[in-house]
Amino acid sequence: MSTIDSLILKTIVDTAHDHYFIADADGKVRCVSPSAAAVYGISCEELRASTVQRLEADGVLNPSISMEVIRSGQPAQLVQRTCTGRQVIAQAYPIFEEGKLVAVVSRSMDLTDLQLLQQEYALLQQRLSDHLKRSQVVDQEDTALENELDNLEVKSPLMREVALLLRRVAPTDANVMMLGESGVGKTAFAHQLHRWSARRDGPFVDINCSAIPESLFEAEMFGYRAGAFSGAAPGGRVGLIEQAASGTLFLDEIGELPLSMQTKLLKAIQDGRISRLGDSQSRRVDFRLVVATNQNLSKRVEEGSFRLDLYYRLNVIPVTLPPLRERREDIPGLVEQQLKRLNRRYGMEKILARSSWQSLMSQDWPGNVRELENWLERAWLSSDEIINAEGTASPELVMGHQEAEPAEDRTAPGMLSRLCENEGLKDAMSRTERSILAELCMTLFSTYAIAERLGISQPSVVRKLKQHGLSITR
């Protein structure tokens, strides 16, 4: 390495906010950033005079991520506990020369400081929210909101605050992360964010990350040229990211993305460019990114199953949607909307018995809006002109007996065999298929389990659920 290269490297390491370690393939520490001394409780001179093996044995590096890379030859990420009582997240990368491992570069970030910053940020958000609630501006925005929410039900103060936040950030291109339990309506609010944005005339591309097999992810997301691989379409294919150009790319279940795919996605987000498989030229793609998850991504980062740098990229505007049990004021509107959809779909005008409201309002609905809608459809299909919740199994009863009873036995007599008014065979079969899938969405845990139960492929299940607007409740 030349003198100028050494000076450049020293300047980068000495001034970096992260804590850098550079070790030889045999574990000898070659270089360490000054900031590491305070975190690991040992001077830089002592660190440079030691090896990662010795530092791990002495409990200074607990564990040593460099040792993990030396053993595996692969990049690694893990959480360390230092002897000073601090928690850091470390990432390390191997350096090869002519196929031989020659060094390991690792960097770590102090999560203790990050957690304090997150707590301060949450406190500031709460103070801002309290201030806005007392402001006349919110009253004016709240009134305008009534005319702008298409089919979203936001009667509760919690949901109105969420909607107002999305309305404010919609004109920007900031990445948004939707957080909340399964079925709370993250996809619906992502759609609304898109409609409020300047990209409303562009496409809204909805992708469920858990539904794309890892082996097909790169081809599906980035596309490919003709002849890129065996079985490729003759004319090639435009990837899902390119399809979102000038619009919004919505990645649902982002927490299910494998680490190898996270790396490819991060590069596309950072560069704003992608390369199709088999193509040497990169393409500029302009899109707004919105992601959703029902998992604790910060915990997954600590566990090493989600990239820290990708987490920072995605978590620019975090938006948490509360569960239905914390906003029961929204239940009546949601019920009325679903009944209108069901009556329109099946060509009948059924109504809900007044006595049913107490039962509906008292349930906790662990599957949230999705469970409420699926349960209402079950009640609709199993009733005559008046839907009576008292005569229909409650969600808890169904959940408690689902493994003991076959799905066929829980279907109301004649529910699937009767033709509705002006309904043909094709519509009746589609209704039957949807009812069966809705039942399985409430009783099984994954699309793979549904595929096994029905004797079809998992991609077919994913396609059918999307066609019928269904999602797994459990």
Image (spheres, rainbow, N blue to C red):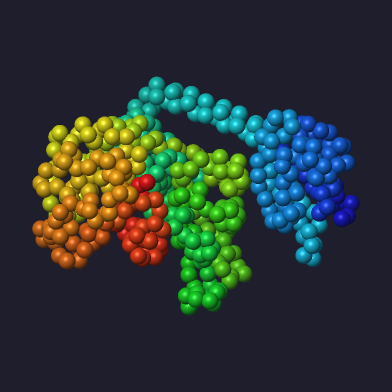
Where does residue 221 sit, x and y in percent of width and height? 50, 61
Q: Quadrant of the N terminus?
A: bottom right
Question: Horizontal placement of 66 versus 297: left or right?
Answer: right
Above or below, 114 relative to 104: above
Where does residue 39 sit, x and y in percent of width and height? 74, 33
Please tell me which residue lies in front, 165 or 24.
24
Tell me if I can see residue 195 in this picture.
no
Above or below, 22 relative to 450: above
**Which residue is rendered at x = 30% and y = 56% of the image?**
437
> Picture quarter containing residue 52?
top right
Q: Residue furthest top?
A: 134
**Which residue is rendered at x = 49% and y = 59% of the image?**
241
- Give the number of marks: 0
Tell me if I can see residue 323 in this picture.
yes
**Which residue is rendered at x = 44% and y = 23% of the image?**
131
Q: Residue furthest front?
A: 404
> Picture quarter containing residue 101?
bottom right
Where does residue 282 sit, x and y in percent of width and height? 59, 64
Please tell me which residue lies in front, 443 or 140.
443
Question: Horizontal placement of 346 versus 216: left or right?
Answer: left
Where does residue 300 sit, x and y in percent of width and height? 56, 43
Please tell me which residue lies in front, 155 or 52.
52
Question: Horizontal placement of 304 versus 142: left or right?
Answer: right
Above or below, 403 relative to 160: below
